[in-house]
Amino acid sequence: MTTAQTPELDVQPTPLALLLLGREADPKSERGVECPGDLPSPSDPDLVARARAAKEKLGDKVFVLGHHYQRDEVIQFADVTGDSFKLARDAAARPEAEYIVFCGVHFMAESADILTSDDQKVVLPDLAAGCSMADMATAEQVAECWDVLTEAGIAEQVVPVSYMNSSADIKAFTGKHGGTICTSSNAKRALEWAFQHGEKVLFLPDQHLGRNTAVRDMGMSLDDCVVYNPHKPNGGLTAEELRAAKMILWRGHCSVHGRFSLDSVNDVRERIPGVNVLVHPECKHEVVSAADHVGSTEYIIKALEAAPAGSKWAIGTELNLVRRLANRFAPEGKEIVFLDKTVCFCSTMNRIDLPHLVWALESLAEGNLVNRIEVDKETEAFAKLALERMLALP
């Protein structure tokens, strides 16, 4: 068929395609795509000096938070580094800072806004820095899931537990329905608390952390867990399956940690005899089961700090952090490699680059508030309730 004979196709780009192209915004999504203002050129040799100058001009009015997965060019300007919850708490502990510049992703900035005072303003240098995991559970989907649990006659037995890596809307749902938030380091305590208050747990939005905690840390079986798929009628589950389950896992995952496979573990053991495999609990269950050590980002850092000189480690977490740790501990004779052969950065976290940070700091220094992340009061109240339940965990 020649070009002239080819029938015209009425192809319309989907909302998702437009979102990925940066031509539309999805108001129901956890992240946005617009970033107003003129960014400096990434090739500007004065970017570092400009960032320092703007930060110095702002003085104590600004407090810069840097998540562990940020690139080095950004992390050098962080006043504190850490995981998402530690950073949000650090921000709340600095009430004198008028501006909190969060070098992380959208849900983290939301958490900082929830935990800081009304006088403090949280800024995200690039509004398109979202989280694919957090985006996998929307408020509408979770409300529909709760309706399914209600129709199955088990909603009153279910306690929601939501991972910190979730939107403010999901945290608010959790608080409103008697649940708590957890981090990767206190997920076991959160589940123990939940089972004291109910017979079942709805775990949002990371199925792997929920499954690994229930099976590896609490002695449940894989048969105690079912996966609720929001894209299928009734989550793809029967009422009988829901009634029999102890853990109802949301079908969500981390795009970075989900890439690691059992083959990755076997391959690195073959290449590096005597290697210690250390992975994050957001990895798949078979990866966690095959690893030597499993723990949160903070756990990973502390484990490497305590490791003996000459030890060998393969780390299953985000590459920016692994590279930083490898460079940090190389002088001590510790060999640290990335678990997978394939390079895998957190693409949305990496949207916070030096030009965006410079633009945000210079705008604030000039008196222009940009990219403020602000959670509405009702959502904030219920989300804060869920966070306070986590803070009260023994």
Image (cartoon, helix red, strand yellow):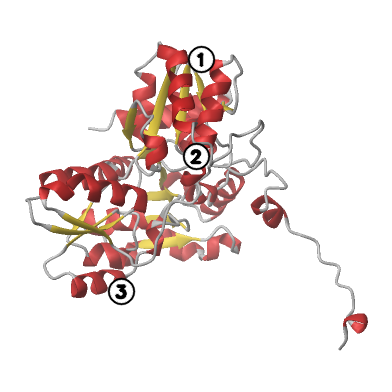
Which mark lies nearer to you, 1 or 3? 3
Q: Where does residue 131 sit, x and y in percent of width and height?
A: 50, 46
Q: Residue at x 43, y 24 (%)?
A: 52
Q: Where does residue 359 sit, x and y in percent of width and height?
A: 56, 29
Q: Which residue is mark 2?
A: 352
The amino acid marked with disc number 3 is: Asp
Badge 2 crowding class, 10 Å Cα cut-off, few under 14, some 14 to 19, many 20 or more, is many
Mark 1 and mark 3: Cα distance apart in space: 49 Å
The amino acid marked with disc number 1 is: Asp
Which mark lies nearer to you, 3 or 2? 2
Total count of labels: 3
Mark 1 and mark 2: Cα distance apart in space: 25 Å
Picture quarter containing residue 178?
top left
Badge 1 crowding class, 10 Å Cα cut-off, few under 14, some 14 to 19, many 20 or more, is few
Q: Which residue is mark 3?
A: 263
User: SS class of the residue under badge 2?
Assistant: loop
Along the viewing direction, whichever of 76 and 132 lies nearer the viewer: 76
Q: Where does residue 257 sit, x and y in percent of width and height?
A: 37, 57
Along the viewing direction, whichever of 20 and 43 lies nearer the viewer: 43
Find out whether the residues at labels 1 and 3 contact each other: C-beta distance under 8 Å: no
User: SS class of the residue under badge 1?
Assistant: loop
Q: Where does residue 137 sit, x and y in percent of width and height?
A: 53, 49
What is the residue that sits farthest to the right in this orientation?
4
Along the viewing direction, whichever of 331 and 69 lies nearer the viewer: 331
Find out whether the residues at labels 3 and 2 contact each other: C-beta distance under 8 Å: no
Q: Which residue is mark 1?
A: 118
